[in-house]
Amino acid sequence: MNRNQVFWVIALIGINILWSTIADNNATQEINRPGADFAPERQTSVNSIIGDSAIPASLECDFSSEIGVEGEVGWSIMLDSQVIASWDGNSSENCVGWSGELSPGEYTITTTNVEGIDASVQLHLQPFEPVRWYGHIVFSILLFALGGGEIVVRMIMPKKVKKVEEDKEIVELEPTPSIESQGIWQDPIR
């Protein structure tokens, strides 16, 4: 295997690792967090990149109190007044999160909480996951198209440079003698 082929293999592996890293990333939406104004209801939009494919999602939650207050807490994810997922419990219990897939749409996430308890609710979306394999294919094809374009340019450019050199006419002008070498007499200008 020559150096050029090794570079192609490294570039192909590198671009696919980069895309895989990007596709694994989460887009996090903070629904409620300690230190911010508590909102019992928040709207969130889930959009698909291509078509109406469902997007992997997970919800993390934590309810805690620094002053020892306990109470009923919970959360729910709703789409068009239909409950997709929910949890209800006591603030002394560990909050149970959720993971699954959400179809594109406008969701309402409600949080049940009592005063004196800090609520931390986060929704994580993976928007590139549904198009992961399409991305691998498209970026690999683009890499080869870019490399093929470079090869075509290298094949065409020397021909154009040679043609331009052939089209150039080199005109050499006779050097005009200086006034000192001619003396006081000059040839008439015609």
Image (spheres, rainbow, N blue to C red):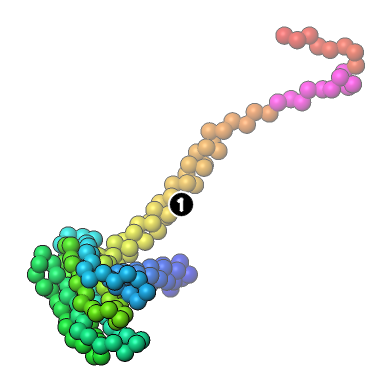
Which image quadrant is residue 67 in? Answer: bottom left
Disc 1 target residue: 154
Q: Which residues are magenta?
A: 173-182
Which residue shows up at 27% across the image and 67% down it? 128
Main SS, magenta region, reads: loop
Examine the rendered structure and indicate whether residue 122 appears above or below residue 154: below
For the residue pair 64 and 146, the one nearer the viewer reads as 64
Q: For the image shown, how many numbered marks are present on the structure?
A: 1
Q: Position of residue 88 (x, y in %)?
A: 16, 83
Q: Is residue 11 magenta?
A: no
Q: Is residue 167 visible?
A: yes
Which residue is painted at 90% across and 16% down in the image?
183
User: Measuring 28% from the left and 65% from the top, which residue is drawn there?
Assistant: 135
For the point 27% across and 79% down, which residue is it? 115
SS category of the residue bearing label 1: helix
Question: In the depicted view, which residue is nearer to us: 39 or 44?
Answer: 39
Q: Is residue 160 above or below residue 39?
A: above
- Tell me the quarter of the picture where residue 95 sits: bottom left
In the rendered image, residue 178 lying in the magenta stretch gets the answer yes
Would you say residue 23 is visible in this rendering?
no
Q: Residue furthest left?
A: 82
Disc 1 residue type (three-letter)? Arg
Rendering coords of residue 121 (x, y %): 27, 76
- Location of the C terminus (image quadrant): top right
Q: Residue 25: x, y in percent? A: 33, 72
- The crowd level at tag 1 (other Cα within 10 Å; few <14, some 14-19, many 20+) is few
